[in-house]
Amino acid sequence: MTYHIAVVAGDGIGPEITQAAQQVLERVGSRYGHTFQFEQVLAGGAALDAFGVPLPEESLRQCQQADSVLLGAVGGPKWDTLPGHLRPERALLAIRKELGLFANLRPAKLYPQLKEASPLRADIADAGFDIVIVRELTGGMYFGPSGRKDSPDGQQAYDTEIYSVKEIERIARVAFELAQGRAKKLCSIDKANVLESSRLWRETVHRVAADYPDVALSDMLVDNAAMQLVGNPAQFDVIVTSNLFGDILSDEASKLTGSIGLLPSASLGEDKRGMYEPIHGSAPDIAGQGLANPIATILSVAMMLRLSFRLADAADAVEGAVQRVLLSGARTADIAHGGPWVNCARMTELILEELA
Ligand code: IPM
Ligand code: MG
């Protein structure tokens, strides 16, 4: 079988880490008899430099026609002063929206071998955790009406949190179904004590819950959730939340695993195609120095294999290889905890060797 993958390497460390992930796919392909064809797509700062827009039409078309998209990261200080509609991040948001990728799955799991790298207190880390954050990805504050206007107090700026029943229902179903295949616990996180949009969120999630009687549903306010994540992460199984809260809580959860350089993500829509990307950004400060951790991107292609291509064996092989390399003691700088570390290329080689 041949799979066509659109690769948006993007900016900063994006090219290094997507390169690593493509090597992993090629290795897995030769082992399991699949062909992965990569098409390089220009988006983000790279596209701004070349064409003056963050997502040229041709780039969007390439993403739409592929079997899935692999994305590194977009953005950097060079483009930070551009107006909102021209920022590199626009490209990412536009791909998510145009491809209808409303469900963002962000697994955060503490590998026992990385406890030392986690900032959690030893007894909390010992309890471990294995969470999937299901983040709504094409609605809410990210896409609501926004703008600026004049006021007697000077300029005013506004962004709007806006959710429809339909949007909440479909993300809730993704989360309930995921929970059914796991520990059957779903925590819906909102700010229903203050926000009307959260009250509709909560009502809707509870209505959908009737279709999933085997899943235990709870609610938590987002401020409390931020606290519970560091105090008792083991209590969570699947979390479902809005675009903005999910953005914030997934960075927090990633740090608990040791490093944001470890967390993959899958963005899915109604069909099987998806976009797969590490949850971290372009890290321009370490770009091109071999300091990047390729693991989040490599685990993202494992998710691609599993969720979009239904190649569970290949996905297991990639995840197993990463685990064994970590177990062997190999560390990139971000998880070395002051000890010896290997660069991005070497970490990739070690994982490839495990896959041989
Ligand atoms: C993420 C990132 C993006 C987001 C940025 C780069 C626009 O932080 O994927 O979490 O906010 O969604
Ligand atoms: Mg983020």
Image: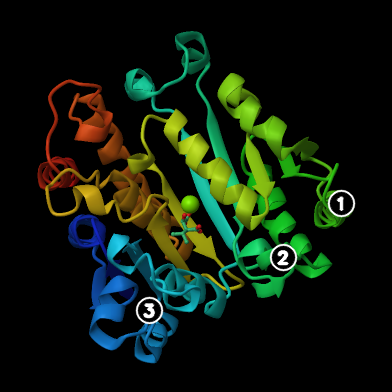
Q: Where residue 33 sits in the image (x, y, percent)?
A: 23, 64
Q: Where residue 220 sits in the image (x, y, percent)?
A: 76, 36
Q: Earlier in the sequence, mark 2 or mark 1?
A: 2
Whole-number angstrom distance, CA of label 2 to CA of label 1: 15 Å
As rendered, which of 303 and 244 lies closer to the eye? Answer: 244
Can you identify the residue that label 3 sits on?
Answer: 54
Q: Where residue 334 sits in the image (x, y, percent)?
A: 26, 34
Look at the image and tell me in which quarter the N terminus lies: bottom left
The chosen color scheme is rainbow
In this view, 338 is above or below 162: above
Q: Name which residue lies at 17% across and 40% down.
A: 354
Q: In the rendered view, does 286 fall on the left or right side of 209? A: left
Q: In the rendered view, does 223 fall on the left or right side of 219? A: left
Q: Quadrant of residue 231?
A: top right
Give amino acid for label 1. Answer: Arg
Give amino acid for label 3. Answer: Pro
